[in-house]
Image (cartoon, grey):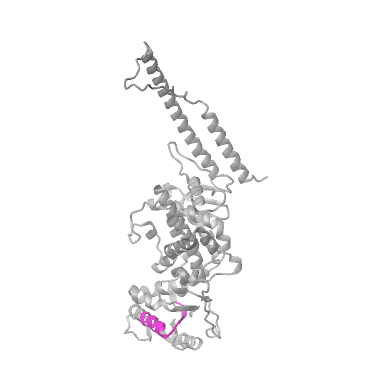
Amino acid sequence: MKSNPAMLLLVLLALGGAAGVILSGSKAPPPAVVKTRPETAPPPLPDGSLEDLQKQIVLLQGQIEYLQGQNDALKDENAELLQKLGTLGMKNAPPVVMKEDDVAPDFVGMGLEMMKMRKLQALPLVTTSVRQEEVEMAILAWLKRQQPKDEAKKLTRALAALGWIPEAVDPLPLRAALLARLLGGWYDTETETMFTVDPETATGPAVISNEPLGIAFGQLLREYGSTLFQPQHGPLTTDKRLAREALISGDASLTRFLHSLQNPSSAPKDDLPTEDPDHPLNQVPMPVFLREMALFPFSRGFDFAQTLHSAGNFPQLNAAYSRPPVNTAEVIEPEVYLDPERPAPVEITLDDVKLSGVAPFLDDRLGKFVCATALRTYNNDEDAGMGTRGLVADRLLAWAAESGAKRDHAAWQTLFMDKASADAFHKAMLNSLKQRYNTKGEAEFNAQGRWVSLMRNRGDSGVVLMDAASEEARTAMKLLMK
């Protein structure tokens, strides 16, 4: 019969309390009460009393040393109980083998502190230390459940068709490796176990110092993961998925930050900036564009969570899981999310999406953050921001190219709030194309084996970027996107 974790927890705590009572049974005798007289000089001591007092001092010193030893023993026993508590109810998890003189990191105690601070009422995470490769495997398994089959790779095929990444790759193993280094652990929902990285297998000290962030993330994933991510309801668009990941990642980053204010020992200890080639995150051979997308939930998510916490403390954050942000625009501008009269998302509709009778392998929404990232590649931050500011909707379609083509066909339709906003985007995107393909800045050209067009439509409030492997495909895309 399966053990009840809650009952075992109570038994362990009771045993710990009993041990404390037994070990603390031998107490030092209370010190003698010495009465003083109002005179400034102390009364004379009787004969032999000085020698008796010295004996009592020696006896008390012995008692103090004994109690100190008992206190150390209690600490060791408490650490052992916490370690056992951390492995309570573990499913298929390897046993924890500690070396002599090693001190087990108190991840269970740290988790309890953060749960209390975050106002989450749940049992502590079952915790064990495994190799970093096993942490990456656990993350990869979770990512594949969120984006099954080739969903993630289809997106990189489309991004490669637009020229934003060098070639199509499977991003999930790369992202799993990045998250393992960023979090220092992972909560595996299948085994209900928090895996932390074994220090001997870590790729750098920053990985170990990030474990508090991983524990905070794991607690929130256990609490709200099934609400945010429900693969049975179909795949999320890239924009919506990034927004939901930003909620939980930002919440974890904020929790870790607030905890480190009270416990400086758990603050990040890595001194290397993320731009340094030796930084653990840069050990993952990931295209820059995909790295930016993977880090967005933590960087901008922290600001989003902080704004929600300022507006209504943790109850406001808790409520956000029942009404998560619908796109990255709401994460970037939390005041839009907090507006009770926020406008409904705009959808771009098309009469037909088949290219020469062939359906697209990808039909996606990229959102405001991806738009800004694309423009920042070849524009300064100010021009990229101006080009992104008025975006209200977008839609990315990609079709398989003919045999032998290195890149597929892609069309990215964008829609802005007015003509002026569309003009700013058109200018920034045209500059990007000019630098990427080394052209004179034409809105339509063929270069490097690609047929490219940047076309205005939808009453001058829309701009569509078409990048095709053949002139025939570009012509057909124009008819679809007119």
Q: As drawn, which residue projects farthest toward the top? A: 47
The picture places residue 211, in percent across and down from the top left corner, at 45, 51
Q: As drawn, which residue projects farthest toward the right? A: 1
132 up-or-down from 475: above or below: above
Q: Is residue 413 magenta?
A: yes
State whether residue 208 appears in this view.
Answer: no
The number of numbered discs placed on residues in the rendered structure image is 0
Q: Does the magenta stretch include residue 217?
A: no
Q: Give the range drawn in magenta.
A: 406-430
Residue 235, quarter of picture: bottom right
Q: Give the camera-side residue of 9 and 1.
A: 9
Q: Give the camera-side residue of 6 and 476.
A: 6
State whether residue 356 appears in this view.
Answer: yes
170 up-or-down from 195: above or below: below
The picture places residue 318, in percent across and down from the top left corner, at 54, 60
424 up-or-down from 145: above or below: below
Q: Quadrant of the N terminus?
A: top right
245 up-or-down from 73: above or below: below
Residue 48, quarter of picture: top left
The picture places residue 463, in percent across and down from the top left corner, at 44, 84
- Residue lying at 38% horizontally and 50% vertically, measured from the top left: 205
Q: As drawn, which residue projects farthest toward the front? A: 38
The picture places residue 480, in percent across and down from the top left corner, at 51, 86
